[in-house]
Image (cartoon, grey):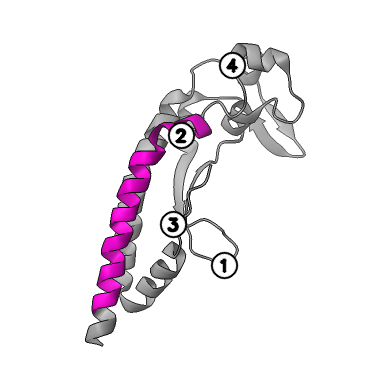
Amino acid sequence: MGIEVIGAKEVLKELRQLDPDMRKQFQKDAKAIAQPIVTDAQNRYPSKYLSGMFKNWSQRGRQLFPYDQSKARRGVVIKVDTSKRNNSVITIIQKDPAAAIIDMAGKKNDSNLSRQLWGAPSRVMWPAAEANIESVTEEMNKALEVVAKEIERKIVVA
């Protein structure tokens, strides 16, 4: 799910040049505004899944399991990035590999077993975003309007 606010990336880039401190404050505010999605996602991770998910498992030298609820909750983070390579400005991601696998398992090879036990992929991140997206979008638009007005004010003064 994506919400596009046209001009947000440009506004934030201008803000970085005009007032770096205000840009930093906006970044903090944006993280606070998106926090309901993060909190909802964190609360959706269950304490138990399949018993094998609590054993060590690595693939190509990368540790993927064991699954740990507290690590899954800590893995949900907000990232603010205005670089050219990113389409989005604010992203909520899951950094814990076990939690990401649990969230999306069965997407590629439509497993009826996983759907019956846990529901369709995405089980955590998308439902959390969908449940909170309207209020977060509304607050984010308000914050961007304040920033845009400040930029306009500083340009007129300069």
Q: CA distance from mark 2 to mark 1?
A: 26 Å
Q: Position of residue 74 (x, y in %)?
A: 45, 35
The C terminus sits in image quarter: bottom left
Residue behind mark 2: 130
Q: Earlier in the sequence, mark 2 or mark 1?
A: 1
Q: Nearer the viewer, residue 122 or 69?
A: 122
Q: CA distance from mark 2 to mark 4?
A: 18 Å
Residue behind mark 1: 84
Majority SS type along the magenta span: helix
Residues at badges 4 and 1 in contact (C-beta under 8 Å)? no
Q: CA distance from mark 3 to mark 4?
A: 33 Å
Q: CA distance from mark 4 to mark 1?
A: 37 Å
**Residue 129 colored in magenta in the image:** yes
Q: Earlier in the sequence, mark 1 or mark 3?
A: 3
Nearer the observer: mark 3 or 4; the answer is: 3
Q: CA distance from mark 2 to mark 3?
A: 17 Å
Q: Earlier in the sequence, mark 3 or mark 4?
A: 3
Q: Earlier in the sequence, mark 2 or mark 3?
A: 3
Q: Earlier in the sequence, mark 4 or mark 1?
A: 1
Residue behind mark 3: 5
Residues at badges 1 and 3 in contact (C-beta under 8 Å)? no
Q: Residues within 10 Å of mark 1 (few under 14, many from 20)?
A: few
Q: Residue at x 46, y 34 (%)?
A: 130
